[in-house]
Image (cartoon, rainbow, N blue to C red):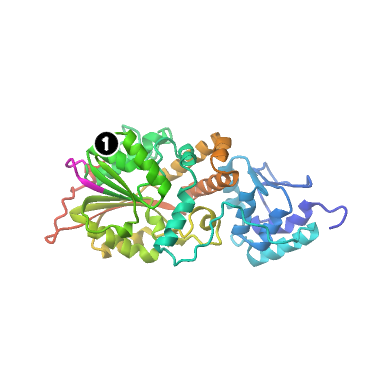
Amino acid sequence: MGDKATVAEAFLPLLHAAVGRESPVRFEFWDGSVIEPAGEPAGVMRVRSKNALRYLIWAPGELGLGRALVSGEVDLEGDIFVLLRALQSTAPRDARLGLDGAWQALGAARRLGAIGRRPEPPAEEAKPVRAGLHTKRRDAAAISHHYDVGNDFYRLVLGPSMTYSCARFVGPDDDGHTPADPTVTLEDAQRAKHDLICRKLGLDTRPGMRLLDVGCGWGAMAMHAAASYDAQVVGVTISRAQADLARTRVAEAGLSDRIEIRLQDYRDLGGEHFDAISSIGMFEHVGTKRAAAYFETLRTLLRPEGRLLNHAISSPGGSVMSPRSFVGRYVFPDGELMDVGETILAMQRAGFEVRDVESLREHYALTLRNWVANLESAWQQAVSLSSEGRARIWRLYMAASALGFEDGGLGLHQVLAVVPTPSGATGMPATRRAWG
């Protein structure tokens, strides 16, 4: 690099390859040089050292950038939603780091004297598991990576309900014709979601119904069903941290006589029968190849006229979270999103009759915005409860996900199905009015 050259000058070709020539973000570099946007900056991306380039050289693309962000070699400052939306809207369609970006990064690194040994990935990165995809062992490791990061950290982000799934933002006078209401509190919205699921499952038709909650998390759905509808609930999870806290919360609520929390894989359920099954935020961990077996297993557990509510994120055409992606390596290892049409088909092939499909896409965007606000408002506490890298991961992935739900790249569907009797009886109400 010449005496008069700056980091910004060396970095400019890489920036053009990654986000286009009209970047809306101000870039600041460790030598004090900057790249200014043409207009008012949507935010600031601060590149703190040469190691940011090393991450990009050794893992070109999303993974390298993710490592730089998680490690703190790159910082994002400003309104995270505005910044991410601006980058998304101005980057050319073919802008990617990829092989071309690797050469750009290598050239910039040479000019900056940043060529060096492979930097160690941040400690928060998921470690590869030597087991087949969606085997019990590998699924347990993936679930532990995501959920066993500290119950106190999740309580801070999710709020008192400890509910890690899309809420339902409706007011008490909602008539079903108004948009999701951002003035509704997160706690009320989560309570409304649980209540809707209970009514869809018919738990209000008679007391004492037996409910299986697959992927029960910290027990919120189980507790609502038991307390509000006198259901007898079995909740299963393969996260030890979740199971331990769920049992504590159940006991503190005085519901231990109606709720059993098990540390158990759904594949080990058998020989039991239930009146209803809820699967909330669980199906994303099952995998496309195991979807048929998942629904077949649940089908064998339901009595005739028993109902299943599958509440899951969906993606048009489906989406696999690659281990080379930020989400696949740091957030949901081995996660997969199915197209809702494929989900419905898998349920029907397993012997279910699908009776209702409802999208809550806009509600998930609001849920995520609430979670990001919770995290940002208690940032130092979040860092002390986990790590700065973990807090950075959650802020980035939740904000990006919110934008995905807002623009339709991601969906959230509740699919309600029933097991008909041999004569075709289902016990289902004639219309949706039964659950509002």
Q: Nearer the viewer, residue 260 or 13?
A: 260
Dot 1: what SS? helix
Residue pointed to by mark 1: 227
Q: Is 193 left, or right, of 351 in this rendering?
A: right
- Please provide the residue range marked out in magenta: 204-211
Of the residues shown, which amino acid type is indicated by label 1?
Ala
The percent position of residue 220, horizontal first and vertical second, equals 35, 41
Q: Is residue 209 magenta?
A: yes
Point out the image quarter for the N terminus. Answer: bottom right
Relative vertical location of residue 51 with respect to residue 134 in this rendering, above or below = above
Q: Is residue 375 visible?
A: yes
Q: Is residue 205 magenta?
A: yes
Question: Residue at coordinates 35% horizontally, 47% vertically from top-left?
Answer: 216
Q: Position of residue 370 (x, y in %)?
A: 47, 38
* Drawn side of residue 147 relative to residue 220, left or right: right
The residue carrying pointer 1 sits among few (fewer than 14), some (14 to 19) or many (20 or more) residues within 10 Å by Cα, namely some
Quadrant position of the C terminus in the picture: top left
